[in-house]
Image (tube, grey):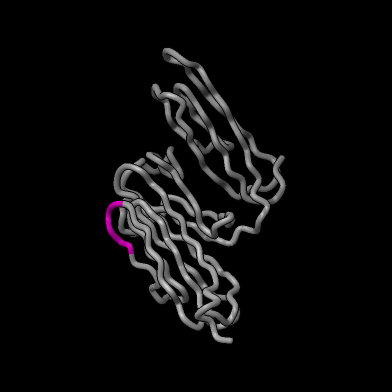
């Protein structure tokens, strides 16, 4: 039985593992592996059935399952796509909670939905409503691969390219109130990571 909220499920396995939530296969990693970690998230409420299948090949045998309840309100509407262009029908959409940084994921050599998105060539969009003060803000984004950040449909950070990106930009005189932040991301090959956050730039804010 789950309280109303967002849950992150993590599995450490050596070797193969599959994880179902009700009848939906969320993690499908049925292969030999040395101490790999797989993570997925879902917004849940009420009674659900969890199932884990595991097999041991050779060497070390290990299995660890964690369920983490994210207490913050789900501020992001997340949508995931096959391919790196954010086009076509969505593979999956869900509400997601903010973290210490508003958006902070590291999938390493995987994806958010291993059973439905391959480890390479996928993309995602997060849209959230956040309260800002009447101030100047610095926006930061770290990603591997491409990332774009919009504030009320105005492009603030443009790192839409392959490879590791660490960018910042200053947005002057953001008006007080609720503003829409949109983050777009794609992972082409290798490590997959995105982190986006912002903070007031007091030295350049109106007094």
In the foreground, 106 or 39: 106
- Residue found 50% across the figure and 83% down from its top: 173
- Residue found 55% across the figure and 36% down from its top: 10
Q: In this view, does 140 lie to the left or right of 119?
A: right
The quadrant where residue 50 appears = top right
Asked if 26 appears above or below 86 in the picture, the reply is: above
Q: Is the magenta stretch mostly helix, strand or loop?
A: loop
- Please tell me whether residue 161 belongs to the stretch shown in magenta: yes
Q: In this view, does 114 lie to the left or right of 7?
A: left
In the foreground, 154 or 51: 154
Residue located farthest toward the top when viewing the structure as drawn? 58
What is the count of numbered marks? 0
Asked if 147 appears above or below 54 in the picture, the reply is: below
Q: Position of residue 39 (x, y in %)?
A: 51, 39
Q: Where is residue 85 in the image (x, y as percent from the top left)?
A: 31, 58
- Please tell me whether residue 187 belongs to the stretch shown in magenta: no
Give the position of the N terminus as an image quadrant: top right
Magenta range is 159-163
Give the position of the C terminus as an image quadrant: bottom right
Residue located farthest toward the front when viewing the structure as drawn? 203
Q: Where is residue 116 in the image (x, y as percent from the top left)?
A: 41, 42
Residue located farthest toward the left when viewing the structure as drawn? 162
- Residue found 45% across the figure and 21% down from its top: 15
Asked if 89 appears above or below 172 in the picture, the reply is: above
- Residue found 69% across the figure and 40% down from its top: 47
The quadrant where residue 109 appears = top left
Asked if 149 appears above or below 188 in the picture, the reply is: below
């Amino acid at each position: 039985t789950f309280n109303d909220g967002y849950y992150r499920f993590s599995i450490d396995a050596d070797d193969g593992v599959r994880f179902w939530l009700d009848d939906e296969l969320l993690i499908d990693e049925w292969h030999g592996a040395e101490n790999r970690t797989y993570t997925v998230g879902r917004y849940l409420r009420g009674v659900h059935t969890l199932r884990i299948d595991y097999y041991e090949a050779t060497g070390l045998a290990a299995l660890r399952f964690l369920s983490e309840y994210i207490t913050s309100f789900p501020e992001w509407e997340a949508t995931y796509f096959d391919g790196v262009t954010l086009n076509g029908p969505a593979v999956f959409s869900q509400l997601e909670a903010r973290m210490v940084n508003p958006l902070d994921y590291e999938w390493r050599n995987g994806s958010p939905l291993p059973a439905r998105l391959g480890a390479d060539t996928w993309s995602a969009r997060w849209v959230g409503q956040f309260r800002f003060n009447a101030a100047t803000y610095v926006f930061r984004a770290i990603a591997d691969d491409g990332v774009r950040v919009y504030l009320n449909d105005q492009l603030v950070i443009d790192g839409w390219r392959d490879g590791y990106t660490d960018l910042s930009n200053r947005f002057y005189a953001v008006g007080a109130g609720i503003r829409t932040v949109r983050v777009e991301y794609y992972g082409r090959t290798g490590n997959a990571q995105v982190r986006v956050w912002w903070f007031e730039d007091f030295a350049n804010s109106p007094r």
